[in-house]
Amino acid sequence: MPKLSVLLLIVVSVVPSVCAQSPAASDIDKDLFEVTIPRLESFYSSHKYTVTQVVQWHLARTHKYNGIYRAVETVMEKEALAAADQEDREAAAGVYANALHGPLWGVPIVIKANTSIEGQITTDGWAGYIIPGHELIAPRDATVVARLRAAGAILIGHTNMPDFAASDTNRSSSFGRTGNAYDVRFSPGGSSGGTVTAVTSNMAVLGNGTDTGNSIRMPSATSAVVGVFPTRGLVSIAGIAPLDWLLDNTGPIARNVTDAAMALDAMAGINLDGHPTPDPLDARTADAAAKAQPGPYTQYLKPDALKGKRFGVPAFILKGTDIPFQGIAAVVPADAAEAQERKTDLPLRPETRAAFLKALDGMRAAGAEIVFDDSILPDSFPRTASRVGSLPYVREGTEGFLKEFGPAQYHSPEEYQKVIGKPLPSTIIGDSTATDRHGLTAQGQAHIESDPAAQANYFVPRKKTLDIYLETLDRNHLDGYVYPATQMPPPDETMPQNGGISEGPHSETSWVNMIGVPAIVVSGGFYPSGLPFGLEISARPWHDGDLLGWAYAYEQATHHRHPPALVESGLLPDAR
């Protein structure tokens, strides 16, 4: 496709939104349903719709369906309409006429509830942050929110998520349960399930997700949307309430790869020279400009991007060898660690294996070669990755977040406890007991910069895991890896699964977070049940442009996505 500039030229001379003529309902429904950013830009440049009309249409969708699917926790209607009206008035007054506009000008978006929006409650999905009089009200925008606003996006609201993003499904103590747009009885996955349901339901054009162990990619797989996990350090996570700051990441969720690439440009702060902008509040962004492939990322989106490429299928994922979330610290003996690793293994379901093999036909049709070999990331890889122990350092991330983005009443875990009368949960400040969440010997909490055990806990095993990842690519002459984004279809949450309400679906993709390599999920087709299957591709660090190009080529070769048929009456009570 033709290269798009980082900033898009839009000449506008629309009348003020307050005087805009209302479009016919049938016309605007047809035009805005599944609308893409380039298509939306064409409506604005031809003066067919104002920003206010577009925002009103998406808000109407949210009001109509949100009571059933519970995707948006906080609808920012007043703020969204005010921002839309401001853009319309500035355009009508000629402030931006013949000037450069941001690439997301007038695009309605949603933001995950752990991502700070100035003046809004950062619920993080947890009832403890919405206690009346003690809410976690953000003093300013997270870096990604500020960049999305600067690109012209209009914020529709905060999307629902499980408490602290610590679940593979989407039930929160602050708002309740989110349903899958393709069947409200089923899980949309977590922890970005609110964003994927909002985006696939056309409540917004796109949104952000966060991902600590699979939380952008796995829910994207359940809902036929594109989910991007950028190279860690390409996009700042400052202002996002952490689950585990050493594993956390944020990226776009959209209905197609082009929109995702344009959103990633904005989130990374791609400048006129094509380089991402570092954020002093996130040290890992410091080297991005020197390492990352240059933007804009739309320049990599070519239909033939998969021709001649080779992708390996990780053997351990097909086998179902698991990596315990947040790894296992170095103090844990090898035999105890191995027993814990085996306890959490998760076999690939037969129906998911069949969907994966069928999805690979689209890769081959687009010109890629798929390599199956037992030596491609065998069991030794997840066993090495399992020793990347980040759990001893989670408190440091929460401390840093509250210091910079906490409300006036509390800027530390200690201040929270003093104000509320009870401590923050161990999920985000660590456990002071003798064992960690895996039931194994715990080290206690420390700052990674000064901890003598940090090399053995985190840095050395992380490097070993990344080395294996890269050496396997080199040895087999591979461009990347391809695998199912989940180990199973989305579960039915109206029926017990293995004796209880499902906490899934689950995946075997947390190793991506441990080594920080880029990965993307695209629609890989549908199960016989009608629920979506997601295909995941990962690449070398900082090759985000190549990765988006491959996903685009697959999307263009297959056109798997189709929108859900939404219902207007609920099938489940509000389950928290």
Image: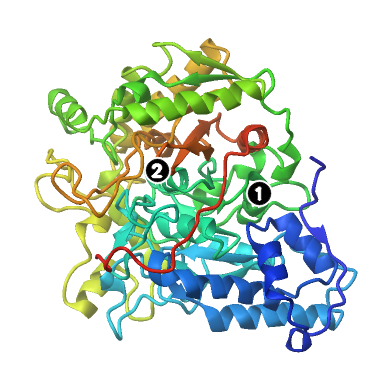
State the quadrant of the C terminus: bottom left
Residue 345 pos. (x, y %): 24, 29
Q: How crowded is mark 1: few (under 14 residues within 10 Å), some or many (20 or more)?
A: many
Q: Tell me the residue that label 1 is attached to.
A: 276
Residue 181 pos. (x, y %): 44, 56
Figure check: 338 above or below 447: above
State the quadrant of the N terminus: top right
Q: Tell me the residue that label 2 is attached to.
A: 214
Which is nearer the eye, 454 or 89? 89
Amino acid beneath label 2: Asn
The reply to whether residue 243 is in sight is: yes
Which is nearer the eye, 571 or 250? 571
Residue at x 67% of width, y 20% of height = 367
Residue at x 19% of width, y 68% of height = 423
Which is nearer the eye, 117 or 292? 117
Residue at x 41% of width, y 43% of height = 218
Residue 308 pos. (x, y %): 68, 17
Q: Are marks 1 and 2 in contact (CB under 8 Å)?
A: no
The reply to whether residue 70 is in sight is: no
Which is nearer the eye, 27 or 38? 27
Residue at x 39% of width, y 11% of height = 374
Give the image quarter of residue 339. top left
Q: How crowded is mark 2: few (under 14 residues within 10 Å), some or many (20 or more)?
A: many
Element type where label 1 sits in the image? loop
Residue 566 pos. (x, y %): 47, 60
Figure check: 358 above or below 174: above
Sequence-earlier tag: 1 or 2: 2
Element type where label 2 sits in the image? loop
Figure check: 327 above or below 394: above
Mark 1 → mark 2, Cα distance in angstroms: 24 Å
Amino acid beneath label 1: Pro
Figure check: 340 above or below 115: above
